Amino acid sequence: MIVVSDTSPISALIRCDQLHLLQKLYDKILIPKKVFEELQYLVHYNISIDILTQSKWIKIKEVSSSFLVEKYNNEVEEGEAEALVLATEYKADLILADVLAARTLAIHLGFKTKGLLGIFLEAESKGFIENSQLIQELIASKIVWISNKVYEQYLTSLKKIK
């Protein structure tokens, strides 16, 4: 399975020390160079991103089509645009993204998408984590912002897998 990620899911998982979930769920994650550059701001939070450069399961890739990046950048941020282009170039099976505009464009382009909550749901369904109180902690610490509607949908989905 080829999985491409934009910045937000990886950032949140690093900040809550749960990046290992991606390795358990997927063999390999591709991220474009721009996403890696965006993740470097985590150093300002005293969080090491060495795992991205030293990991054998996270691959930082350059995109080939600057034309497509510019085209998609009209609708989404540059890291998200590069992730979409990378997904296109590698014929990805899944794009990890949280921002609605990026997810909408990815779906329009024919990709399956999953965000942070979907990652946690899948991890719970496979027994990698037990209680997603982590989401409440992430929201309370302002690491992520999740609308009430999306959070309620998450709780409903969580009940279905238990």
Image (tube, rainbow, N blue to C red):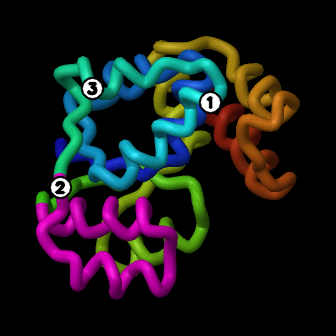
Q: Nearer the viewer, residue 103 or 121?
A: 103
Q: Mark 1 Cα within 10 Å, few/some/many (few <14, many 20+)?
A: few
Q: Amino acid at mark 3?
A: Thr
Q: CA distance from mark 1 to mark 2?
A: 24 Å
Q: Which residues are magenta?
A: 62-89
* Residue 53 image label: 3
For this view, does 124 lie left or right of residue 80?
Answer: right
Q: Give the mark nearest the N terminus, 1 or 2.
A: 1
Residue drawn at (61%, 41%) of the image: 117
- Reply yes or no: does residue 151 show up in magenta: no
Residue drawn at (25%, 69%) of the image: 85
Q: Nearer the viewer, residue 52 or 9?
A: 52
Q: Residue 135 location, x and y as percent?
A: 73, 30
Q: Give the mark nearest the N terminus, 3 or 2.
A: 3
Relative to 39, residue 82 above or below: below
In this rendering, the label closer to the viewer, 1 or 2: 1
| Secondary structure beneath label 3 | helix
Q: Amino acid at mark 2?
A: Glu
- Reply yes or no: does residue 78 show up in magenta: yes
Residue drawn at (67%, 34%) of the image: 158
For this view, does 28 lie left or right of residue 158?
Answer: left
Q: CA distance from mark 3 to mark 2?
A: 14 Å
